[in-house]
Amino acid sequence: MYRAPAIFVSHGAPTFALEPGLLGSRLTALGERLAAATAIVVVSPHWQTCGIRVTGAAWPPTIHDFGGFPPPLYSLTYPAPGSASLAAETASLLIDGGLVATVDSERGYDHGAWVPLRYLRPEADTPVIQVSMPHNLDTAGALRLGKTLAPLRDRGVAVVGSGSLTHNLYEVRRGGETAVYAKEFAAWSRKAVLAGDVQALLDYRQVAPSALRAHPTEEHYLPLLVALGAAGGDTAVAIDGGITYGVLSMDSYAWGVPGPA
């Protein structure tokens, strides 16, 4: 039986949809191994709610939830089908895990979902549902959310946490050198992920170098913990994405994927 992977992907800025950089082609290569997936579940920091909500529309619309970016971005769509049955099953799984969850029959895919999926599954031929992040989510809660979603992998459903390994938009640089702190934080994260040091990743704001500078708010780091929770005992594979705009690390990770990613 096919067991789908767990993935953390850095989606960086919305312009990643137009500027693939190092990561785009590597996600596409990884996505070829998702051809057997029955569906994809995505958790993105751009949908935060009271409790947890799950998209249940048959054809979720593409949401352009950003402003001031190049006009071509606003014409991009990701027409993947949803799955009402999987949405209901996922909500039930979350409720059985002690979480509060409901199905949202109107919500579409925000850019944290559709931007990386345009590289992972460019054909948009795999059903996708999105799971929101609770407003009060912390690292322990994100790990728990991932563990609750983990059984879906045994049904062939890939679990994707979409965030950014570093995410300080106040320091975005259109040119110039890459910030040293971003490289140091990315290197620390890679060491912790590949070592399977769950406690360090849970406590990253206290123990990682420049954690508060790398993540003034932590919603973009929490999807890493979701993917880690869904990973179970699988070994992590690092996907080098480089650093864009001087401060946005695009490094990503996959669990349960055979061979180099």
Image (cartoon, rainbow, N blue to C red):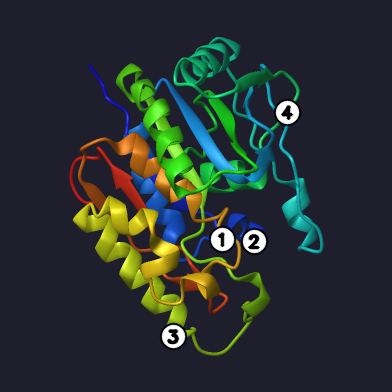
Query: Label 3, label 2: how many angstroms apart (C-alpha)?
Result: 23 Å
Neighbour tally class for label 1: few under 14, some 14-19, many 20 plus, Cα within 10 Å = many
| Residue kind at label 1, given as amino acid type | Gly
* Residue 11 left/right relative to 13: left
Q: Which residue is mark 2?
A: 15
Tell which circle, 4 or 1, labels the residue nearer the N-terminal end: 1
Q: Are marks 3 and 2 in contact (CB under 8 Å)?
A: no
Query: Label 3, label 1: how many angstroms apart (C-alpha)?
Result: 18 Å
Q: Nearer the viewer, residue 252 or 28?
A: 252
Where disc 2 sits, the SS reads: helix
Query: Label 2, label 1: how many angstroms apart (C-alpha)?
Result: 8 Å
Q: Which residue is mark 1?
A: 12
Q: Nearer the viewer, residue 199 or 17?
A: 199
Q: Which disc is residue 175 wearing?
A: none
**Residue 230: percent from left, percent from top:** 35, 35
* Residue 90 left/right relative to 31: right
Looking at the rendered structure, the number of numbered marks drawn on it comes to 4
Neighbour tally class for label 4: few under 14, some 14-19, many 20 plus, Cα within 10 Å = many
Q: Nearer the viewer, mark 2 or mark 4?
A: 4
Which residue is pictured at 40% across the width and 62% down the height?
A: 204
Q: Which residue is mark 4?
A: 107
